[in-house]
């Protein structure tokens, strides 16, 4: 029986006991991830004090400038996860190709995809940033995972979660049995259950979008955002605009308070008419979490969890949050489809 304040390890073990056939490998994988999160949290929280800020002068495959803390978090995650024997392959936003498990280490049955430090463009301004992860089962033959093992749709995820490095460090994840949140108590170095069985409100009064891109949006999106700004106290409008520019922060706030986050396809960049956010290690894991919390995630035309990936770093429009709000958005997009 879960009690507020219990350690994440005890809670994971209690959850595992519900599945007698469980081998404990997923538990081991999650514990390795949690160790990496604690190390990254320590560095993020003192980044302002040591020369770990600033740019490395390189760019990742998506053209984002890689910040030193990005590189640090990426390295920490890889070194924490490569030897546990739970994984057959990894993939990261910061690595162009999949990351094989070194030959010297045992291989496992799981696949890990992650964005090591999302929102990193905000690092220097001390804005909350986060790690996002997605876990799949290996589906190809042989012990070494492949790109095919990484290109799985969201509805096949085994687990997904994020760690938010903010005023406190919070771990939120699901294994398909609901969503729980844990807050790091730095005095003991342990994540303690703080948000049990999170359910997102069916409708919110917050919208999160970069309206600087509005002229590049499709007509349905433009009409929907205008609708949110009209006054109608029966539907809680006008909604409040809350946009941090750090996906994990915006998502976490809306998960708890209710509301809708939108990063639509913005056609300012014809090369990326799909918008900016990546499917495999941003949209898909957050979609799993929000659905487990009673919410919804769509591109506007299809459910994020149904998309069969074709590329490791492919981008998708992401509209995610309270179910009633996302359904209303989809109606606007349908009504104004070109
Ligand atoms: P924009 C951060 O760089 C990020 O990838 C997400 O964390 C965030 O939601 C989005 O980009 C912000 O993008 O175009 O509004 O600055």
Image (cartoon, rainbow, N blue to C red):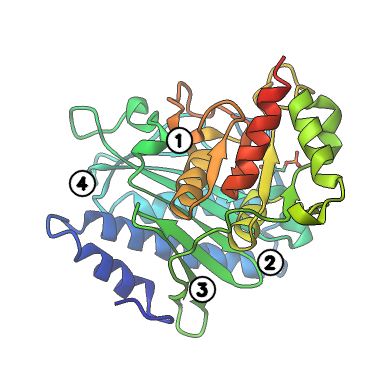
Q: Secondary structure at mark 4?
A: loop
Q: Secondary structure at mark 1?
A: helix
Q: Position of residue 76 (x, y in %)?
A: 47, 55
Rounded to the nearest whole Å, what is the CA distance between mark 2 and mark 3? 25 Å
Q: Nearer the viewer, mark 2 or mark 4?
A: 4
Q: Position of residue 118 (x, y in %)?
A: 61, 48
Instruction: Look at mark 2 in the image and give the residue it sits on.
Output: 50
Q: Residue furthest front?
A: 234
Q: At 29% across and 77% down in the image, what residue appears?
A: 1
Instruction: Look at mark 1 in the image and give the residue it sits on.
Output: 305
Q: At 48% across and 61% down in the image, what residue appears?
A: 172
Instruction: Look at mark 4 in the image and give the residue it sits on.
Output: 106
Rounded to the nearest whole Å, what is the CA distance between mark 1 and mark 4? 30 Å
The quadrant where residue 142 appears? top left
Rounded to the nearest whole Å, what is the CA distance between mark 1 and mark 2? 40 Å
Number of residues whose C-alpha sits closer than 10 Å to that of mark 2, classed few (under 14), some (14–19) or many (20 or more): few
Q: Secondary structure at mark 2?
A: loop
Q: How many marks?
A: 4
Q: Which mark is residue 183?
A: 3
* Disc nearer the start of the sequence (4/3): 4
Quarter of image, ligand 1: top right
- Determine if the C-beta at disc 4 is less than 8 A from ligand 1: no
In the rendered view, would you say 211 is above or below 317?
below
Q: At 41% across and 63% down in the image, what residue appears?
A: 34
* Disc nearer the start of the sequence (2/3): 2
Rounded to the nearest whole Å, what is the CA distance between mark 4 and mark 3? 32 Å
Rounded to the nearest whole Å, what is the CA distance between mark 2 and mark 4? 36 Å
* Disc nearer the start of the sequence (1/2): 2
* Disc nearer the start of the sequence (1/4): 4
């Amino acid at each position: 029986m879960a009690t507020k304040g219990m350690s994440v390890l005890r809670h994971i073990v209690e959850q595992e006991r519900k599945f007698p056939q469980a081998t404990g490998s997923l538990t081991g994988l999650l514990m390795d991830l949690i160790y990496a999160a604690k190390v990254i949290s320590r560095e993020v929280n003192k980044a302002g004090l040591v020369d770990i800020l600033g740019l490395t002068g390189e760019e990742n495959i998506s053209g984002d400038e890689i910040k030193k803390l990005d590189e640090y978090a990426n390295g920490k995650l890889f070194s924490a996860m490569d030897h546990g024997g739970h994984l057959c392959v990894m993939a990261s936003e910061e690595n162009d190709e999949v990351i094989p498990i070194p030959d010297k280490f045992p291989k496992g049955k799981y696949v890990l995809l992650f964005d090591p430090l999302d929102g990193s463009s905000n690092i220097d301004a001390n804005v909350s940033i986060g790690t996002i992860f997605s876990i799949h089962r290996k589906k190809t033959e042989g012990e070494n995972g492949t790109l095919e093992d990484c290109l799985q749709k969201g509805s096949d995820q085994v687990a997904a979660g994020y760690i938010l490095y903010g005023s406190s460090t919070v771990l939120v994840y699901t294994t398909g049995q609901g969503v729980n949140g844990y807050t790091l108590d730095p005095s003991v170095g342990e994540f303690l259950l703080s948000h049990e069985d999170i359910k997102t409100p069916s409708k919110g009064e917050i919208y999160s979008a970069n309206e600087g891109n509005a002229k590049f949006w499709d007509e349905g999106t433009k009409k929907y955002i205008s609708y949110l700004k009209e006054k109608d106290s029966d539907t809680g409008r006008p909604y409040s605009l809350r946009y941090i520019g750090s996906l994990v922060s915006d998502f976490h706030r809306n998960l708890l308070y209710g509301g809708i986050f939108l990063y639509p396809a913005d056609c300012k960049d014809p090369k990326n008419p799909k918008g900016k956010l990546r499917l495999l290690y941003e949209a898909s894991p957050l979609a799993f979490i929000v659905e487990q919390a009673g919410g919804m995630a769509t591109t506007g035309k299809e459910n994020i969890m149904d998309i069969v990936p074709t590329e490791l770093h492919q981008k998708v429009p992401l509209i995610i949050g309270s179910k009633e709000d996302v359904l209303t958005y989809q109606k606007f997009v349908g009504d104004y489809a070109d």
